Amino acid sequence: MRTAAPGAKDAQRRPRRMRWANMRTLVAVAVLLAAGIVPVSAQPGQPASRCTHDTFPVGGQNVAVTACAGAPDSGQTVAVAETLKGAGSSFTHTMSIQVLPGASASRGVDDVALAPLGLQYTLHLTLAYHDATVVIEHALLLPGAIPLK
C-alpha cells in the first residue's frame, strides 16, 4: 500500500494560483483588445476621429446628430454623411464642403428637414472641416432661429 507524501492531498484540492506576471499579461491583452474594438464600433465605415456627435432637444425629444467626413475628393470637396436619430426612427443625409487651400478650416452650411423623424422643424447646421475631421460649430432650430449650439 502506497502512502502519499505529507501535504500532497491538500495540494491536489487547492486551485492553482495565477502568477502576477500572468495576471498582468492577461490584463494588458484585455485592455489592448478593448481599445481596438471601441473605436471601430463608434461609426461603421468611418474612423471615430472623423466624426462628431451632438444631441439637441427638439420638439420634446432628443435628436442625436452624427456627422462623419469622408476623404477629400481631389483636394476640392469633402463629402459629409449626417445621421439623425430621433425617438423612434433615423435617417441619413449627405452634403459636401468645399475645401479652401490654406484656410485654417473650411465651412459648409446645411439645412436638414426633420420630417423623417416626425418633427416639423429644420435643423440649420454650420459644419467645419479641418485635418480630416468635421465638427458642428453652430446649430439653429427653424422656424424661430432657436440657437442649439
Image (cartoon, rainbow, N blue to C red):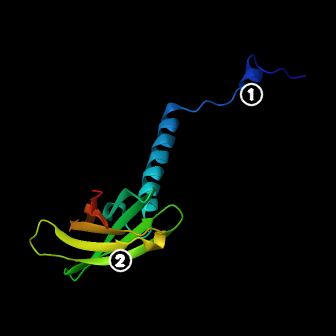
Mark 2: amino acid? Thr
Q: Residues within 10 Å of mark 2 (few under 14, many from 20)?
A: some
Residue at x 44%, y 50% (from the top left corner)? 32
Of residues 68 and 34, the one drawn nearer to the viewer in this rendering: 68
Q: Is residue 149 left or right of residue 38?
A: left
Q: Position of residue 149 (x, y in %)?
A: 27, 56
Q: Quadrant of residue 65?
A: bottom left
Residue at x 47%, y 63% (from the top left corner)? 86
Of residues 64 and 19, the one drawn nearer to the viewer in this rendering: 64
Residue at x 31%, y 77% (from the top left corner)? 95
Q: Quadrant of residue 57?
A: bottom left
Residue with the most extreme right position? 1
Question: Mark 2 or mark 1: which comes first in sequence?
Answer: 1
Q: Is residue 10 left or right of residue 53?
A: right
Q: Report how far apart the C-alphas of labels 2 and 1 lie in the structure.
A: 65 Å
Q: Position of residue 130 (x, y in %)?
A: 20, 66
Kind of element beneath mark 1 = helix
Q: Position of residue 10 (x, y in %)?
A: 74, 21
Which residue is disc 1 drawn over?
A: 12
Mark 1: amino acid? Gln
Residue 115 in view in this figure? yes
Of residues 19 and 85, the one drawn nearer to the viewer in this rendering: 85
From the image, state whether disc 2 or disc 1 is nearer to you. Answer: 2
Residue at x 54%, y 64% (from the top left corner)? 88
Which residue is disc 2 drawn over?
A: 94
Q: Residues within 10 Å of mark 1 (few under 14, many from 20)?
A: few
Kind of element beneath mark 2 = strand
- Residue 19 vs 49, above or below: the answer is above
Q: Are marks 2 and 1 in contact (CB under 8 Å)?
A: no
